[in-house]
Image (tube, rainbow, N blue to C red):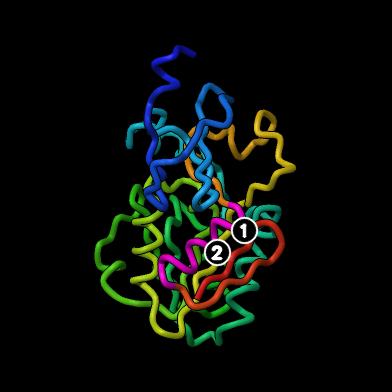
Amino acid sequence: MTEASHAVKEICPLCHSGDPAQFTESHKRIFYHCPSCDLRFVARRFKLSPEDEKKRYDLHRNDIHDVGYQKFIQPIVDGVRDFYPKSAKGLDYGCGPSSVATHLLSGLGYEVEIYDPHFFPKSKSLDRTYDFIVCSEVAEHFDRPNLDFQQLKNLMGKKSHLFLMTLLWTEDVCWAEWAYARDTTHLSFYSRRTFEWIREQIGFEGLKFRGDRIIILN
C-alpha cells in the first residue's frame, strides 16, 4: 500500500464525520473505523458497480423452501409475531430475488409488500407507511447508511417497528477471518454503539437487541 493510498480521506457514510481512520487491510479491501458512531466500513473506492453487485447477488441461493435457511431467518419472523397481529401490513426492504422472510410471514397470514433496488424496484412500495418493516441481511450492503435509515424511518408509522437482521461486530472479531467482511458486497458493519447512534440521530424512539444479529427499532 502506497503513501498516497493511505492519505485518501474517507468521510463516514453514516454520521458524515471526517475522522474515520483506516484500521485494517483485509480481503483485498481497506476498512475504516469511525470513532464518532462506531461504524466500520469499506473505503468507497472498493464499492462494486451496480452491474457487478447484481451479479454477486445472483449467486445467492436463498431457496424459500430451504429448511436450514428458514431456521436462520426465523428469529426475525418471531420478532414480528411478538409485536403484531396477522392483520398488520409490512414491507420486506431489500428482499432480493426471493425472500424467505416474506414467504414465512405470508404463510402466517401477514400481508407483506416487497422492495429491492435490483430485483423489485417498485416505487409505489416506497410511497406509503407500514405497520412493520423487515430488513434481513441487508444493512451490511448499505453504502449510504444514513440515507437508507432515513428512508426506513420515513416508511414507518407512529407505532411501527423495524426488524433488522445483520451480524454485529465486536472487539472479539478477527477481521482477517470474519466471513462477513470477506463478502465484496458487504460495505457497512455495525456495533451496538452504532445502533445507539442511529436511534438517537435518525430519530427512533426505542432500540432492542436480541442476540448478536437481531435489532429492533421503533
| Residue 200 magenta | yes
Residue at position x 56%, y 24% in the image:
25
Would you place residue 20 above or below residue 211 in this image? Answer: above
Magenta-drawn stretch, dominant element (helix, strand or loop): helix
Q: 10 Å neighbourhood of mark 1: few (<14), some, or many (≥20)? A: some
Residue at position x 65%, y 67% in the image:
209
Q: Amino acid at mark 2?
A: Glu
The stretch of residues the image draws in magenta is 191-203
Q: Is residue 22 left or right of residue 209?
A: left
Q: Which mark is residue 196?
A: 2
Q: Which mark is residue 94?
A: none
- Measured as percent of width and height from the top left, residue 183 is found at 55, 35
Would you place residue 94 above or below residue 129 in this image? Answer: above
Say if mark 2 contacts mark 1, CB within 8 Å.
Answer: yes
Furthest-top residue in this view: 2
Between marks 2 and 1, how big is the CA–CA gap? 6 Å
Q: In this orientation, which residue lies closer to the viewer: 60 or 157?
A: 157
Q: Which quadrant of the view contains residue 43?
A: top left
| Residue 164 magenta | no
Residue wearing tag 1: 192
Residue at position x 37%, y 60% in the image:
115
Q: Amino acid at mark 1?
A: Arg
Furthest-right residue in this view: 172
Furthest-front residue in this view: 19
Q: Is residue 123 left or right of residue 5?
A: left
Q: 10 Å neighbourhood of mark 2: few (<14), some, or many (≥20)? A: some
- Measured as percent of width and height from the top left, residue 147 is found at 34, 56
- Measured as percent of width and height from the top left, residue 73 is found at 63, 60
Q: Which structural element holds mark 2?
A: helix
